[in-house]
Amino acid sequence: MNTSLNYAYYPGCSSTGTSVEYDMSSRAICAALGIQLQDVPDWSCCGSTPAHTVDHSLSSALSARNLDQVASMGLDSCITPCPSCLANLKTAKHKMQDENFRDKVNKLLEKPANTQVETKSVLQILVEDYGIENIKKKVVKPLTGLVVGAYYGCILNRPAELMQFDSREHPMAMDNIMEALGATVVPFPLKVECCGASFGIPRKDVVMRLSGKLLDTAQEIGALALVTACPLCQMNLDMRQSQINRANGTKHNIPIFYFTQLLGLALGLTEKELGMDKLCVSPRTLLNSIAKEEQIKEKAA
Amino acid sequence: MKVININSSYDSDFVREVEEESGQKLNLCYQCGKCTAGCPYTDEYDISVSQIMRLTQAGQKEKVLQSNSLWLCATCESCTSRCPNEIDVALIMDVLRHMARREGYTGTGRVKTFWDSFLSSVEKNGRVFEVGLLVNYISHTGRFWTDVDLGPKVLPKGKIHFKPTEMQGKKEVAKIFMRFNEESAK
Ligand code: SF4
Ligand code: SF4
């Protein structure tokens, strides 16, 4: 294991609001694993989906301002928990290798853009740089009895040429982590299907249908919870679960965790540090049952 | 189904522009339909993504750019991942959307208004301010907030802020938008 993992950390806008528990738990697990994070100073929005639907130079310029901030820290790699930020930051770097495009972006910026800074997801560095075997060694509270499905969402690994991580159709990174933590992982068949993304406000009906299908499937395969790595997926499945139930006549009560929250739990961090109380679908019963299973196992041993 | 006379309305400039802006070769598409088969939004589309590919190949500019599908595509990358000819279909959808915008097409308008509200929030605050974005969207569409029921669930979580977070460089961000608007007007 590399003992001096050190990254610039780009939290992204949703971390200041609707996905605050993703940010909290990402920071907490990195601290617990000895991974150093330095916040990108005065970071700004990457432009998210709306910017790239308007124009690619605008989208890349918004991202480039942040890549430049990373370079000013003397670092050349940046990590972010959010797949949407990840896609934009990576796309900007990738597209700016083309001189004509770079010129277009530079016209929008104060100073020429940095084209070297590499961005990865928190998930990717945990798997590739830290290593699942090493994570396993740090587990103090195994997630015994937790039956969980891993849902990756559509853009964490796609397009494959850009993301360069895991598989575009059958990603396994979170499945493997959950297994290392002692959970029982059930293969989730809709791993990379779209949840309805940012259409919750302009076209809620679409989110009800697509996220509804994800929850129905989770139930069918006997998953007691889903883990996600994306603020939009998590929000659609968790915050909107009651709306989905009403729209589709279902009665789902499936906690939707960020993978970092469950990882933190297994590392012995407190529920408070991991923002468990920020989840809309209460994980209380489930968390109690994990603790109980663990006690029974300990007694038997 | 409406029949289009392809020969009379073939717009070669349109085909060239799409190819240039996306860097993709449209004639690689042989209409296998795999992109449509995996498109989560196809039930909502007025023209399916493989048909958009075909109509674009055939230079049917107006028919393509007025399609509401362009505004419902979530860039989920499923089509791109599965196309047997490795066409970046999602990128073509993105490029078509840029063109539609430039030519004044908006689909049914709601999605575009939402995205515009998002960007004006970034332009103003440097970061997205969720509550401000919502208020802006509602005032532009005249629609009721369809998430009122979430209030009692979400508010006690302390996730919703009624003031934007402060950042130093928000003027720099606003300038990116300003320069972009100037460049687009050229
Ligand atoms: S998957 Fe590719 S080749 Fe098949 S119809 Fe779609 S764009 Fe054409
Ligand atoms: S990227 Fe757009 S067109 Fe392609 S599958 Fe996803 S929603 Fe459909």
Image (cartoon, rainbow, N blue to C red):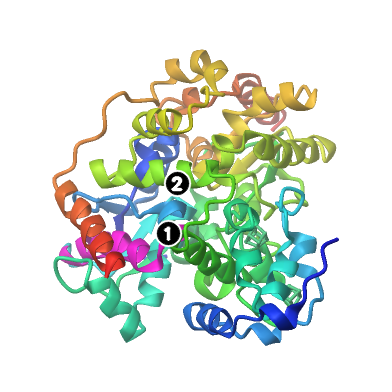
User: Can you say which quadrant of the picture contains the C terminus of chain A?
Assistant: top right
Residue B147 in the magenta stretch? The answer is no
Q: For the magenta stretch, what is the residue range?
A: A53-72
Q: CA distance from mark 1 to mark 2?
A: 9 Å
The residue identified by callout 2 is B115
Q: Categorize mark 1 by other alpha carbons within 10 Å: few (<14), some (14-19), many (20+).
A: many
Q: Position of residue B43 (x, y in %)?
A: 77, 49
Callouts 1 and 2 close, C-beta under 8 Å: yes
Side of A135 where B175 appears, left or right: left
Side of B155 where A16 appears, left or right: left
- Is B86 or A220 nearer to us in this picture? B86
Q: Categorize mark 2 by other alpha carbons within 10 Å: few (<14), some (14-19), many (20+).
A: many
- Residue drawn 30% across and 45% down? B122
- Visible residue check, residue A159: no
Q: Main secondary structure of the magenta part?
A: helix
Q: Which mark is residue A54?
A: 1
